[in-house]
Image: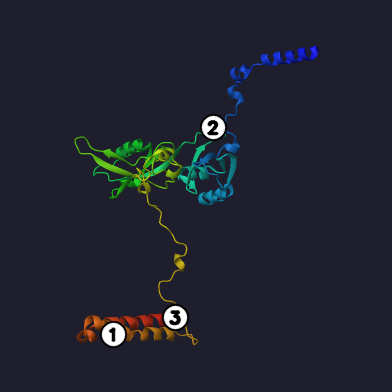
């Protein structure tokens, strides 16, 4: 028993002497020549991204959706790196640069924040807090449509990136369009005061293009007011919200309805067994007396012939002829 107790004490003393300071204080320093001078080819045209949400993402649907949105000519490989962290591997720099330039992107109203893979950074350490977005500036006073004004406004909203060349093409437009860099943890800006030296103050307002879900109470992206801690602490839940959907810009791209070319705006042609449009003629002819009676009541019997015979009957006859001609041409 004494021997066993002595052995236990020896082991305890040995563990007590073990220190983890070596892990904290020492490290491996490599010469520059030992480190690759270029980024791993597999990561050369890669982006790391995350979605601004606490909800689980349907990865399969997300991959198919983004591939459809981006349509990379050389293809894309999307890999799941962990909880809400993804690697987007492109196979041509043009495809990657196009995705970066066309930001912001989203999936199911969740903002996608992406960053380039850089030398010396672990994939999970790529900073993913900033995104670029186009902002429309409304109610600018006359004479304020200039590059310098746009830059100053952009730096107030976030950080100015560029200005739309169409702002200064010589034609009048209702707003200035600028691209800015925003931090996802800072509230969106709604408006600002602006004036020229010696002039009066004016309010200008902002609308954000392709903006995703943001809180109407705190103005921060990524959640609605129902998941906002500040809103939950608010006693008067019915009080007016500082932010609103008025901050969302209308879609600048025309909506092309796929079914539009299949729509017809006239009545369908109905052919008889003989292959003519006699039935259509009979339908239109049958409404002539009704039209005449209605117009007679409205215009008076003394003007009936002058009012009816010329415009209305002529239009009906033209309609009949057009239907017959159109039906025979098909």
SS class of the residue under badge 2?
Answer: helix
Instruction: Classify residue 307 by image quadrant.
Output: bottom left
**Camera sees residue 74:** no
Residue in the image at 35% along x and 35% along y: 155
Q: Quadrant of residue 182?
A: top left
Circle nearer the N terminus (3, 1): 1
Return the x and y of residue 235 as percentages of the image width and height.
Answer: 38, 40
Q: How did the renderer colour the structure? A: rainbow
Q: Secondary structure at mark 3?
A: helix
| Residue pointed to by mark 2 | 125
Q: On the image, numbered disc 1 is attached to which residue?
A: 293
* Disc 3: CA contacts within 10 A as few (<14), some (14-19) or many (>=20): some
The answer for how far apart the CA atoms under marks 1 and 2 are is: 81 Å
Between label 2 and label 3, give the one nearer the viewer.
Answer: 2
Indicate whether 114 appears above or below 18. below
Q: Residue 191 in the image: state x and y as whole percent.
A: 31, 41
């Amino acid at each position: 028993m004494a021997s066993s107790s002595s052995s236990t004490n020896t082991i305890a003393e040995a563990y007590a002497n073990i220190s983890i300071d070596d892990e904290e204080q020492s490290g491996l320093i490599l010469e520059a020549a030992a480190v690759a001078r270029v980024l791993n080819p597999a990561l050369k045209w890669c982006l790391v991204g995350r979605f601004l949400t606490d909800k689980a993402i349907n990865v399969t649907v997300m991959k198919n959706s983004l591939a459809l949105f981006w349509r990379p000519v050389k293809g894309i490989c999307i890999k799941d790196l962990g909880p809400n962290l993804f690697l987007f591997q492109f196979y041509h720099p043009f495809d990657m640069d196009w995705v970066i330039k066309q930001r912001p992107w989203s999936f199911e109203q969740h903002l996608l924040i992406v960053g380039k893979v850089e030398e010396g950074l672990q994939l999970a350490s790529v900073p993913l807090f900033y995104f670029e977005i186009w902002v429309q500036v409304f109610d600018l006073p006359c004479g304020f449509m200039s590059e310098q004004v746009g830059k100053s406004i952009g730096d107030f909203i976030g950080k100015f990136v560029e200005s739309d060349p169409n702002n200064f093409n010589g034609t009048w437009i209702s707003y200035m369009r600028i691209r800015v860099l925003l931090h996802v943890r800072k509230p969106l800006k709604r408006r600002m005061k602006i004036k020229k030296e010696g002039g009066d103050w004016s309010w200008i307002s902002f609308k954000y293009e392709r903006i995703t879900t943001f809180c109407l109470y705190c103005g921060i992206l990524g959640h609605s007011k129902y998941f906002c801690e500040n809103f939950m602490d608010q006693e008067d839940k019915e009080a007016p919200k500082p932010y609103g959907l008025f901050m969302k810009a209308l879609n600048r791209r025309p909506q092309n309805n796929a079914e539009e070319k299949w729509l017809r705006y006239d009545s369908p042609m109905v052919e008889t067994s003989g292959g003519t449009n006699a039935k259509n003629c009979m339908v239109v002819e049958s409404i002539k007396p009704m039209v005449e009676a209605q117009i007679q009541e409205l215009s008076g019997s003394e003007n009936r012939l002058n009012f009816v015979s010329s415009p209305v009957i002529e239009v009906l006859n033209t309609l009949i002829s057009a239907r017959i001609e159109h039906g025979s041409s098909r």
